[in-house]
Amino acid sequence: MGKDKAAALTSLSKPALLLSILYVVSGVTSLWAFSLTGFRMITLPVLAIWGFAASGGLWMKKRWGRWFALFLFVPHVVQAVSLLWSYLLLMGSQLVANSMMLVLLLGAYVIILTLSTYLLLRTKTDSE
């Protein structure tokens, strides 16, 4: 087996690596937010656990991990956009520096998640 082929089999594509990291970070923050809500928002730990599973599947280069990550795109974006929208409605014109940082981070998360999912869709896997 050639050196290039071995490196291609062991390396993770950049969109898969980015999505894997995003799902782990999102999962950790979702579990933290779940404790802040008094353990009431059950969607937070469910999406966190599914995100950890998708991240593991992407990291191990499993075919189901790729499809699971693509499937999880919609719930993660819906959750982030609804949180962003409700926060903007709650704060209105009273946005201060700390809350503006949260708005910018949520917006950046949605943009990076969308771009990396799009790039993951465009990449070919070894089995295809």
Image: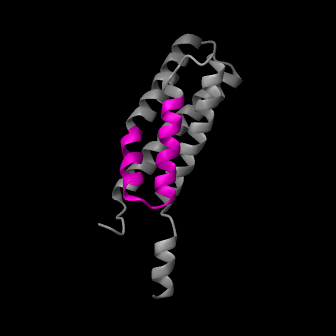
- Front residue of this view, candidates 90 and 93: 90
The number of discs equals 0
Instruction: Point out the image quarter for the C terminus.
Output: bottom left
The quarter holding residue 22 reads top right
In this view, 93 is above or below 64: above
Instruction: Point out the image quarter for the N terminus.
Output: bottom left
Q: Is 68 contained in the magenta span?
A: yes
Q: Is residue 38 visible?
A: yes
Residue under the point 55% across and 16% down: 40
- Front residue of this view, candidates 86 and 2: 2
Q: Main secondary structure of the magenta part?
A: helix
Residue under the point 46% across and 23% down: 82
Residue furthest left in the image? 128
In this view, 27 is above or below 2: above
- Which residues make up the magenta segment? 45-73
Left or right for 59, reference 63: right
Residue under the point 37% across and 58% down: 63
Coloring applied to the structure? one colour
In this view, 62 is above or below 46: below
Residue 116, how many percent across, how many down?
A: 45, 50
- Front residue of this view, candidates 63 and 17: 63
Residue furthest bottom in the image? 2
Q: Is residue 92 visible?
A: no
In this view, 39 is above or below 7: above
Residue 127, how many percent across, how many down?
A: 32, 67
Residue 25, how many percent across, how many down?
A: 60, 42
Residue under the point 46% across and 47% down: 54
Q: Is 42 contained in the magenta span?
A: no
